[in-house]
Amino acid sequence: MKKEYLNKFYQKTHEERLHALVSAEVILEEDTSDFKRKLQLPEETANHMIENQISTYELPLGIGLNFFIDQKEYVVPMATEEPSVIAAASSAAKIIRQAGGFKTSIQERTMIGQIALKDVSNMKEAEEIILQHEDQIIEKANQAHPSIVKRGGGARSVKVRQIEADEQYNAPAFFVIHIHIQTLEAMGANIINTMVEAVKPYLESLTGGTAIMGILSNYATECLATATCHIPVSLLRKGSFSGEEVRDRIIEAGQFAVVDPYRAVTHNKGIMNGIDAVVLASGNDTRAIEAGVHAYATRSGQYRSLSNWSKAENGDLVGTMTIPLPVGTVGGSINIHPGAIFSKQLLGNPTAQELEAIIVSVGLGQNFSALKALVTEGIQKGHMGLHAKSLAISAGAVGDQIDLVSNELKKRKNMNLATAKEILEQIKDI
C-alpha cells in the first residue's frame, strides 16, 4: 500500500478520494467506474433478503485510515451515520501506528450450540451419562452437517451446565448441554442450529428429560479476540496537558468505567461505535455481536468497561481489550450484498481471524480517541465540529453552502439548527 496518497484524505472530493485509493493500490481503476451503482443493493436481492421489502435504506460508507495491525497496513471500511466515528478511529490509529501499531491474539474460533432440557430427574447421573457418550453426541452432530466436517470443521466437544430452579423468576431447573463447534470461515448460525436440533432426540433418550430447544448461543466465550497497544507519553501531549498527564488521566477514566456501570455503558457504547461500523460494513450481524459483547462486559457480575488502560514499567500507556467476536467472511449477506463484497476486497480478503483482529483493534482505537478527548479538551469540541455539516444540511444547505454554513457555525456560541438556518439565510442574501 502506498499510503502517502491517502494523506489529508478528508479534504479531498469524492472523486479525488476514489483516485487516491487507486493510487494507493487499495482498489483497482476499474472499481471506480460507476462506483455508486456497483455498491447499491439490487432490489431483487433485497427482496429475497427480508420479508415485506419495500425499498433499501442507505448509510454512509467511509474508511478508517492509518490502521497498522499485526505488522500489516489496512484501510478499514466503516458504515455509520455518526459524524465523529471514522475521524476518531483514524486519529487514534495514526498515533498508535507511530507507536508500533496494534497487536492482536485470536482464540481458536469455536462457537457454542445449546440444547436445554427440563424434567431431568437426576442431573448428576445425567451429566455422567452425557460425558460417557460424548463421542456419540459429536458423531451425530457432525452427521447432521457433513460438509463442514469435510472442510475441517465440525463439533469438537461437549460440556454440561446445571441450572438450579429460581423461585424469584418462577423458573424450573434446566439441564443444558453445550456443543462446541468449529465453523471455520462462517459465523455458522445455520450450521450450529442444524447440529443441535439433530441431537435433541438422542439427548432426550440419554437423560429422560424433555428438550425445550436447540439453538446457537451468541455469547461466544470460546471465540475471543484481544487487541493491545503501547503508546509512549511523547505521543500523548495535548494542548496544555503533558504526555504524562494525559496518560494518567486516561488510566483514571478507564478505572472509572470499570467500577461505575453508569459510565461503563457509555464507555462501551463508544467502543461499539467503531466495532459496529466495521461489522455492518463487512456484512456481519451487528445485533449478535452487540449482545455477546455486552454480556461479556457483565462476566464479573457487574457491567464493566470492556477495555483496560494501565502504565507500563517504561511509562508507556498500555491499552488492552478482549471481546467475543463470532464474525465470518462467508455466508449470509456477506456473499450477496455489494457493499459487503466491496468491503471484503478493501480489506484484502481477510480470513475470519484476521477480520476479528481488525475489528477488535478498531474498537480499542475508538476507545483511546474518546478517552483522550474526554480527559483533555472535552468530547464536544471535536464531535460538534463534525456535527456542524449535519446541521447545515438539516437547515437546507446544498453544494458549496454546506461548507460555508458549517464553517461559520463552528464560530458561533450556539451551534444548533436555528443558528444554521440563520447563517444560511445570510449566505443567500450575499
Image (cartoon, helix red, strand yellow):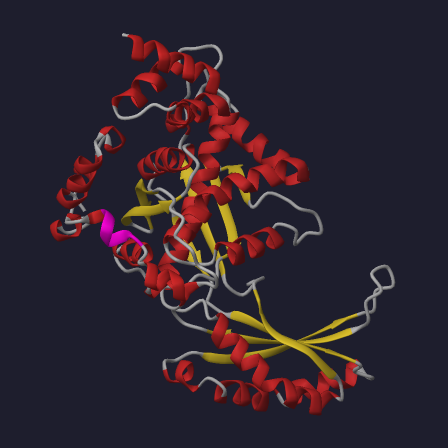
Residue 15: x and y in percent read 18, 37
Q: Answer with the quarter of the image where residue 175 lies.
A: bottom right
- Residue farthest to the right, as pictured: 167
Please report the residue visible at 42 percent of the width from the left and 53 percent of the height from the top: 279
Asked whether residue 9 is in view, the answer is: yes
Residue 346: x and y in percent read 26, 52
Residue 350: x and y in percent read 31, 60
Please report the residue visible at 64 percent of the width from the left and 44 percent of the height from the top: 304
Image position of 429 (left or right of 368): left
Q: Answer with the quarter of the image where residue 149 lies.
A: bottom left
Please report the residue visible at 45 percent of the width from the left and 63 percent of the height from the top: 50
Q: In this view, does 145 lie above or below 167?
A: below
Which residues are the magenta region? 36-40
Q: Is residue 91 above or below residue 36?
A: above
Disc count in the image?
Answer: 0
Q: In this view, does 94 lie above or below 236?
A: below
Instruction: State the predominant SS element of the stretch in magenta.
Output: helix
Image quarter hosting the C terminus: top left
Please report the residue visible at 73 percent of the width from the left and 87 percent of the height from the top: 207
Q: Which of 397 and 292 is in front in this view?
A: 397
